[in-house]
Image: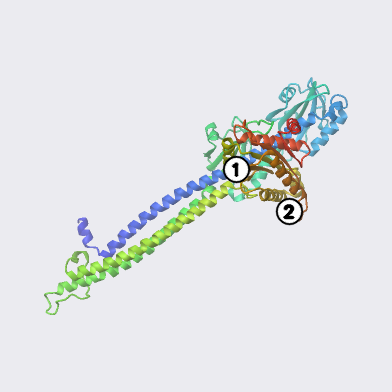
Amino acid sequence: MTFTQFADGILLRRQISLLAGAIALAVIGVTAVGSALLASRQATEMAQSNLLQVARSVADRLDQDMAERLREIRNVAALEALQPHWLENTGSLRKVLDRMQGTLPDYAWIGFADREGRVRAATGGVLEGANVGQRPWFQNGIKHAAVEDVHAAVLLQSLLKPQADGTPFRFVDLAAPVSDASGQIIGVLGVHLSWRWADVVRREVLSSRRADLREDIIVIDQAGRVLLGPDLGATPFTAEALAAGSFFALRPEGDRIATATSTRGRGDYVGLGWIVVALQPINTALAGANHLAVLITLLGLGAALVGMLGIRSVAARLSRPLSQLTEAVDRVGREPNARMTHRVHGSPEVLQLSASVRSLLRRIGTAEADARHIEAEASNAVHVAEDRVRRLGADLHAMQLLADTDALTGLLNRRAFMPLAKDAMSYFKRYRRAICVLMIDIDHFKRVNDLHGHASGDEVIRQVGLIISEAIRTTDKVARFGGEEFVVLLRETDLQGAAIFAERIRQTVADNVFEPEGACLKATISIGMAEAEKSDEDIDRTIERADRALYAAKSAGRNCVRSLEAPSSSGLSAAA
């Protein structure tokens, strides 16, 4: 049997229903696959963007804390008040070191060793009299301020109180040379900073994220070995994957999306090359996209079924006159009164289409009605498509805002701020219109978190961000760079105008009473300023000078404004 013979035996309404069903299934299949691919790609890009933000947050915290610790050690080593005690009154020196350790318990051991490497004074008297002359921190610290990477300390492991979880001690060493009144180096002040501090940073960042995201953070060294996270000492990622920044970590226990960012140091702390990797299970990241693909497929199948039933009903209605016409034409010439064709029923429509002129006219009328129906359906489909395009545009705009905005304060994040700052720098290079950068940091913010909790700390950050954003002009930009640090870009403003603006913000914050969760507390900020100069290669140079000015403000006692352009501020910056 040929296809033509097969088709001749099937009624027209059934052929239309079968064809419409086949087309609907094909369209649904293409739509479902395309939607699934698009949703999967968008979900992956969004997950990578969020993970990169998490990794950068941890990296910035690590750099900031290490820079603070190095600055503290250098400042203590340079204190004039301690010069008489370094080699003579070691008992008083031990008390000073004990108090220093009490302010920051993460200092597992603090000690002073003379030029021969003999420990003269140490916290708790640990290692006093021991010779540390062969230790890297001493050998490097006798020359300049030094930082040594994460390592185990076998000797201290047996002398210090065991950790609560029984894990071995690991430390980051910091050291700075100590000079007498004549400037002669007399020894080294060394510190073993417990690596538990980094795990606290990791847990704090993870606790600020939703638990259902199932995110994880790993810190690795330059050689790719895990310093913090599961499988300590392992090398789970290739150098190529880490260099790419975003990659898929394929593991037997489950594949995960991963992003990597390197610590870059801060100020005088050049960094140790740590790499922060943020991960999330692929199934978790794509759960929404998979749900959307299933929903689209089910809705499409339902629409196809309804459409097939509707088309079958329409086809039956359209073919009924043809069947009636077939019987009427068949009676013409057989019955005396059968001279005109009326509404009659008959056999399949296609075989009898040309039987009579009435059949042709009726087909024309039916075709016109069908055309109007199709036109109405097409117009409705256009309206539906336009509505979907509008909703998709709104969703894309919302996702762009989410990617460019800091979740806590609603301000710009670093990713969105830097292109605006680079554009302002280009404008400055071309037209020499002054721009200034302010680096703002909340003073003693860790104390706020420790005394009042992280929720109160977050509220202080939000209110400080609100004070800054309400003070700036529409042409200026403010962003949260991470932690309690903000950056402000002032266009068409020289250093004198920036100083007036910065002092107004500083005074507003100092006069404000913060009331997070019913508590009443005061907070202050320190501000560093820098004006763009012709010698600046890019905006990063201006930001770096503003950051150095911020450290000068911190060293000057906090709650003040400093600029590197002033000679006194330059000295403070160098001391910091």
Q: What element carries label 1?
A: helix
Q: What element carries label 2?
A: helix
- Which residue position holds label 1? 417
- Inspect the image, locate mark 1, and give the three-letter code of the amino acid beneath it: Phe
Which mark is on residue 253?
none
The numbered mark, 1 or 2, whose residue comes first in the sequence reads 1
Label 1 and label 2: CA atoms lie apart by 28 Å
Residue 185, percent from left and from top: 79, 21
Where does the C terminus fall, quadrant-wise?
A: top right
Residue 167 in view (yes/no) = no
Q: Is the residue marked by circle 1 packed among few (<14), some (14-19), or many (20+) residues within 10 Å?
A: many
Residue 235, percent from left and from top: 58, 33
Taking the spot 72% from the left edge, 26% from the top edge, the residue there is 137
Taking the spot 14% from the left edge, 77% from the top edge, the residue there is 338
Q: Is the residue marked by circle 2 packed among few (<14), some (14-19), or many (20+) residues within 10 Å?
A: some
Taking the spot 58% from the left edge, 37% from the top edge, the residue there is 431
Q: In this view, does 173 lie to the left or right of 214?
A: right
